[in-house]
Image: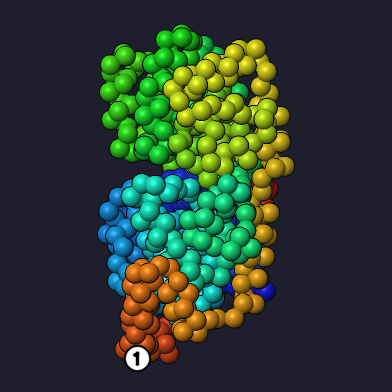
């Protein structure tokens, strides 16, 4: 069966990261399988309104206030009118939210269930249970997932974490990993500097990605190994710490900060390196290490979250999230590169067989098939589910749901569904045929 699906998240292009890449690649493969996909995200600067990407992937950039790291301000009901208009205009069957940090994701799932639509959620991150931020986020997740058809996690560690945080039945949670387009991440030994062993870091420069650990480790690694240099791609609040470290230890010629990267620039950055360094303090999957291994780099990573599930042992060296252990692990990796124990093309061929977006799309499609057969719960059943979220929280959640239902009925009266203009479907088959003809003409 073919579905009209709305992918909703705060995190999408032109922002860069694992969630953004996952959304784009999964959407492209689902389009190729005959589904209609739209993406709903917030506006990025002047990028507001509707944009079309490859294969007619339609993106709605909704004007919304960003408060921190591309996450939007929660409004609960402020997003409802435009969201209803979009899903009615596009005849959406299933709403698929991504990332627990995304306010748009939570609100879209809430409103879609109020409107009687199918909904599922993909969790891309791990959270703790003790600090105030995690407690609040976990309660929000419990609220959102109390009335959800299915949940997808990107690793088994992530599944265990999500089941505990949201008190879910493990049977309604599936594990579908990320993947990589191997053809876009081919090794290029000629791009490497023959005079140095280059260590590449490509990440958001934030605390959660272990930037404090990286700042402490780089001077020690450079002192111990005179023929090693670093190339660091990405941007974030911790960039200033890296710049200060480079100034303090006079490492301008050995530590290069390239700043924000576009998606097509990631491969060119990775192929310059021999070693990929990941210092994350928490990670559900880490698609970056898969892309690096596909480019033929030996990976050094902190042993956290779902990272041990991702790569075979001969492709990765693990370290504890501690400065001394990380320095030692990098030292072992440098020795392996000097002894030429790493064969890049072999890494690439193995990754190509292990991870495929076609496989991810097929497994995601099976989730859609399963939730399509589920009945839509009535309002009283939904209220019962939310009431069980806590002594006080349950009552507050029921009030929020009741108000959301009343707003929906008001919008139905104020803007009748028959007055909403239906968007024409993108002619994918015709577009695909024209692309094939253009490629044939180029070959001739």
SS at mark 1 in the image? helix
The crowding category of the residue bearing disc 1, from other C-alpha atoms within 10 Å (few below 14, some 14 to 19, many at least 20), is few
Question: Position of 12 compared to 250: left or right?
Answer: right
Residue located 66% across and 48% down the image: 356
Residue located 48% across and 49% down the image: 125
Q: Position of residue 385 (x, y in %)?
A: 48, 74
| Res. 15 in view | no
Task: Locate residue 103: give its quadrant.
Answer: bottom left
Residue located 35% across and 56% down the image: 136
Q: Compare residues 157 and 11 and report the one nearer the observer.
A: 157
Q: Compare residues 77 and 44 and report the one nearer the observer.
A: 77
Residue located 27% across and 53% down the image: 67
Q: Name the residue under label 1.
A: 413
Name the colour scheme.
rainbow
Specify the quadrant that holds the N terminus.
bottom right
Q: Compare residues 385 and 20 and report the one nearer the observer.
A: 385
Task: Locate residue 35: give its quadrant.
Answer: bottom right
Question: Position of 321 compared to 400: left or right?
Answer: right
In this rendering, the answer to whether 315 lies above or below 353 is: above
| Res. 153 in view | yes
In this rendering, the answer to whether 285 lies above or below 137 is: above
How many numbered marks, from 0 up? 1
């Amino acid at each position: 069966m073919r579905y009209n699906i709305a992918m909703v998240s705060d995190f999408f292009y032109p922002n860069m990261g694992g969630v953004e890449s996952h959304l784009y690649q999964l959407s492209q493969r689902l389009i190729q399988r005959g589904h209609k996909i739209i993406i709903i995200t917030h506006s990025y600067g002047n990028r507001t309104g509707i944009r079309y990407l490859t294969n007619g992937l339609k993106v709605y950039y909704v004007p919304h206030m960003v408060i921190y790291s591309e996450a939007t301000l929660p409004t609960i009901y402020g997003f409802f009118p435009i969201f209803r208009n979009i899903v009615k205009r596009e005849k959406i069957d299933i709403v698929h939210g991504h990332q627990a940090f995304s306010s748009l994701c939570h609100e879209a799932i809430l409103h879609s269930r109020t409107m009687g639509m199918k909904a599922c959620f993909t969790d891309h991150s791990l959270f703790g249970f003790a600090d105030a931020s995690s407690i609040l986020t976990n309660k929000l997740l419990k609220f959102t997932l109390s009335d959800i058809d299915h949940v997808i996690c990107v690793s088994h560690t992530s599944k265990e974490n999500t089941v505990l945080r949201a008190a879910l039945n493990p049977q309604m949670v599936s594990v579908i990993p990320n993947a990589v387009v191997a053809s876009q991440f081919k090794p290029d030994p000629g791009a490497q500097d023959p005079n140095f062993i280059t260590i590449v870091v490509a990440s958001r420069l934030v605390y959660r990605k272990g930037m404090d650990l990286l700042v402490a480790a780089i001077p020690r690694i450079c002192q111990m190994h005179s023929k090693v240099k670093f190339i660091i791609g990405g941007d974030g609040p911790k960039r200033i710490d890296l710049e200060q470290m480079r100034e303090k230890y006079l490492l301008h010629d050995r530590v290069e900060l390239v700043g924000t990267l576009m998606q097509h620039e990631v491969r060119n950055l990775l192929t310059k390196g021999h070693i990929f360094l990941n210092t994350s303090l928490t990670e559900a999957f880490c698609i970056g290490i898969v892309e690096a291994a596909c480019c033929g780099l030996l990976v050094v990573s902190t042993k956290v979250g779902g990272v041990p599930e991702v790569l075979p042992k001969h492709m990765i060296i693990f370290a504890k999230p501690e400065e001394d252990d990380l320095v030692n692990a990098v030292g072992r990796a440098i020795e392996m590169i000097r002894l030429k124990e790493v064969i890049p093309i072999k890494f690439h061929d193995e990754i190509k067989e292990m991870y495929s977006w076609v496989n991810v799309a097929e497994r995601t499609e099976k989730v859609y098939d399963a939730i399509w057969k589920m009945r839509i719960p009535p309002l009283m059943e939904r209220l019962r589910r939310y009431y069980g979220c806590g002594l006080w929280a349950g009552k507050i959640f029921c009030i929020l749901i009741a108000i959301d239902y009343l707003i929906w009925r008001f919008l139905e009266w104020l803007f009748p569904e028959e007055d909403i203009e239906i968007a024409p479907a993108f002619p994918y088959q015709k577009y695909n045929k024209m692309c094939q003809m253009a490629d044939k003409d180029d070959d001739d």
